[in-house]
Amino acid sequence: MKSKTVFCCSECGNEFPKWSGKCQICGAWNAMTEIHPEKITQKPGTSSADNPAVPINEVSEENEIRFSTGMPEFDRALGGGAVRGSLVLIGGAPGIGKSTLLLQMCGSVAENGKILYVTGEESRRQIKMRSGRLGIANENLYVLAETDLEAALEITEKLEPSVVIIDSVQTLCSANLNSAPGSVGQVKECASAVMRAAKTKNLTAFIIGHVNKEGAIAGPRVLEHMVDCVLYFEGVSSTPNRILRAVKNRFGSTNEIGVFEMAQNGLIQVSNPSEMLLAGRPRDVSGTCVTCVIEGSRPIMAEIQALVTPASGNVPRRNSNGIDYNRVMLMLAVLEKRGGMVLGGCDTYVNVAGGLELDEPAADLATVLAMASSYKDKPIGYDVAAIGEVGLTGELRPASSTGNRLSEIARMGFKYCVLPVRDGEKSNLPETLKLIPVKNVRDAVYAVLSR
Ligand code: TYD
Ligand code: MG
């Protein structure tokens, strides 16, 4: 067969028969790389006799076998523990703590089976030093400093571990391909080889992948759809807060998060994230409002900060961090039109404290109130929280799971909660919490800023 070359966009992972300067799908410039597909598809053939089609009611209903990582927050992000025979991709910026997380996991998992830690980034000694600092020493933990895929797989075959860790997929390199380590072809080939090993030997593989500044794993999004579970380790390196977020999970829910704090001796699990996220909240200053969001099954408190000041240039600057920019612009427009504030000539910055990423409409009201508070330079009470979605006419709509949110708000010691009128009719509320039901944005601003 004539060998055919395809071109793959390193940003979105789409393949094209021809090279072009700009990717037609994602629009990235100069991202096409050449790959040779006939070298990649070297899968072991299975005959149809071994693998017949089965009627669905004859398929066994056996649950997947899970084991604990020894870290409840990690288990939570995985959807209740790691699944035997699955491939988990841990993505994150360099230096965020991915290696630390997996090495810490080894401490407890090595009690029950062999682990092979393949490192292409650090030497064996460096891993040893780090594990010493983390207090992990178990004879079941094997370290292999290797960048050659085939060699790593061969050792996996011999050692028969129950867990394999690849740190990182960008350093691994297959001799079957002549492209450089970290290129689309290599990353794809290495991940699929590890995937095959995981499925055939029923071992659990964790692959670390560095993300580039656009947030895609090593440019290629290609890995995301190959693997069973994708977890992103997020956070700002200058602050200790770390969030492990599931973005894909074939064996569980995808909106669970695990919360950690990076400390001197490794990652500490944060079982009460609200406390951590609200720690250091300023008192009696304008431009901050607290809300409660639901992350997976857990209500978590978040502080939204806003700075609205007269523009320094001709064109006002707007920026948002931890919350969708377009959503903030929408809230700004609603506040101007329905809240009667002249914001057109103001620079506006919105930030979610603690490195949390909000993508819930229930945070709308708190965003609006934080901006109004900054504009009027009037603080919102320290014991006031706000939940609710804001519509284009300035009306407030109820948030989902209001009961859960209100109990968390009460538990964190808040005395008042501003919320949409329809939510305010709920019964069996925490006794210590007083509700301030409001109809629209204008009423909400009036209720909190003229108290
Ligand atoms: P690391 O796990 O090497 O990050 P990644 O594998 O994602 O690139 O962690 C890097 C940072 O974590 C490093 O800057 C030091 C910090 N760290 C601690 O603060 N405490 C610790 O106990 C460890 C092991 C690392
Ligand atoms: Mg690392």
Image (cartoon, rainbow, N blue to C red):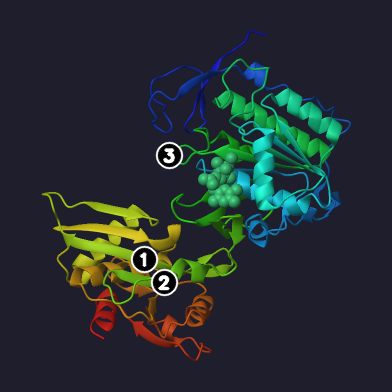
The structure residue drawn at horizontal position 77% and vertical position 34%, both measured from the top left corner, is: 197
Q: Is mark 3 within 8 Å of ligand 1?
A: no
Give the CA separation, mark 1 to mark 3. Answer: 24 Å
The structure residue drawn at horizontal position 45% and vertical position 87%, both measured from the top left corner, is: 433
Pointers 1 and 3 in contact (C-beta within 8 Å): no
Return the disc, 1 or 3, that comes first in the chain's sequence. Answer: 3
| In-front residue for pair 405/275 | 275
Q: Quadrant of the N terminus?
A: top right
Tell me where residue 302 appears, x and y as whole percent. 43, 67
Give the left or right position of residue 391, taking residue 138 as reference. left
| In-front residue for pair 69/120 | 120
Q: Give residue 288's quadrant in the image.
A: bottom left
Give the CA separation, mark 2 to mark 1. Answer: 8 Å
Q: Indicate whether 412 appears above or below 238.
A: below
Callout 2, which amino acid? Thr
Residue 231 visible within the image: no
Secondary structure at badge 3 equals: loop
Give the CA separation, mark 2 to mark 3. Answer: 28 Å
Tell me where residue 64 appears, x and y as whole percent. 79, 53
- Residue highlighted by disc 2: 291
- Residue highlighted by disc 1: 304
Tell me where residue 278 appears, x and y as whole percent. 44, 70
The structure residue drawn at horizontal position 10% and vertical position 49%, both measured from the top left corner, is: 314
Secondary structure at badge 1 equals: strand
Return the disc, 2 or 1, that comes first in the chain's sequence. Answer: 2
